[in-house]
Image: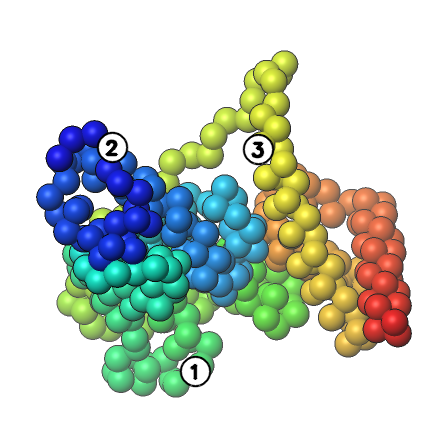
Amino acid sequence: MTGSPPAARDLARQGELAGYAALASEGERKLLRADLYGIVQPVVFGQLTKKLELNRGHFRCATAVSSLADECLDRFHDDMDAVLDDLFRNVRVPVHNLEGWVRTRLTAVTVDAYRRRRGARGALQRPRVPAWLAMKLGGRQSLLELAVDMLEFAGHEVAAGAGIWPVGTWAARRAMRTGGDFEAARRAVERDVDAVVAAMRSRPRWFDDYVERPLGRKRIPLPPAAPPELGEPADPARHQAAEAVLTELAGVAVTAIGTRLARGEDARTVVVDVVRAVFEEPADARIAALADRASTDRLVAAVLAIVAGRGSAHGRRTAS
């Protein structure tokens, strides 16, 4: 076979996608894969990636593919590869709705591929807390859940960055769930991580096999790209994507703040906690500015006005 391959949809409708891919040249397979990528990417992101990122507390990553952080983007590409490989292997009968085919198989295909990747790195394919570890942890639910998170993270390809564990992400998720202070949540997570590690180390061979060895095989994430030099023309698409991210995050923050204010919590405390948790940048200069009382007062006043405005708008919509 030479030249450009037929359209992926046409091959799928004829039930010939898998057969064609098996006999195609490398170049033809690449073109066919690129065609399929454009078809299934919205399905994978909308039906899988977005939900997973929201569950992880990665609100920025849940807005668009272009907003995915390095580790999350790697996971997305892994899931896309799993879906495309499945199409190349299994579309041997007429499929008139490729998006529908992908939706029905999405969870099973990506979970199976994820487990195989974890197994290749020596991590547990199905992270779960063994009975002996649950006893060591005293059956405390928060520690059991954290232990599962740690075992799952140990099998991820990319490292956390500066530390061994993604404590900041876990702390932000805990602070959002409990309505507590971000820094207090971070300290609590750090203590809990130490407790779980100590319990795991009571079985040195198990710890080495399923925690230390997979952690040692992680890929170190690349540093973030440098900002544009002074005078360099701005990228409109990048600016638009950044604006969309900030808008999404602002909506998340306003909703969380409104919920906690409705419980009668102190406005100043709520605003500072939620901004730190949602934007996940407690050490950033913009968040550090919250230590200045005047800046915090201005922020609190502005946010309360936004929350009040949203509440009024919601009331008008309800009344209408």
**Location of mark 3 (residue):** 238
When asked about the image quadrant of residue 130, the answer is: bottom left
* Residue 174 % position (x, y): 55, 67
Residue, x 31% and y 66% (percent of image)?
105
Q: CA distance from mark 1 to mark 3?
A: 45 Å
**Location of mark 2 (residue):** 4
Instruction: Confirm or deny contact between disc 1 and disc 3 (CB under 8 A).
Output: no
* Residue 100 % position (x, y): 39, 63
Name the quarter where the N terminus is drawn. Answer: top left
Residue, x 14% and y 40% (percent of image)?
24
Q: Amino acid at mark 1?
A: Arg
Q: Amino acid at mark 3?
A: Arg
Q: Nearer the viewer, residue 245 or 302?
A: 245
* Mark 3 neighbour density, 10 Å: few (under 14) some (14–19) many (20 or more): few
Residue 140 - label: 1
Position of 59 with respect to 45 (left or right) is: right
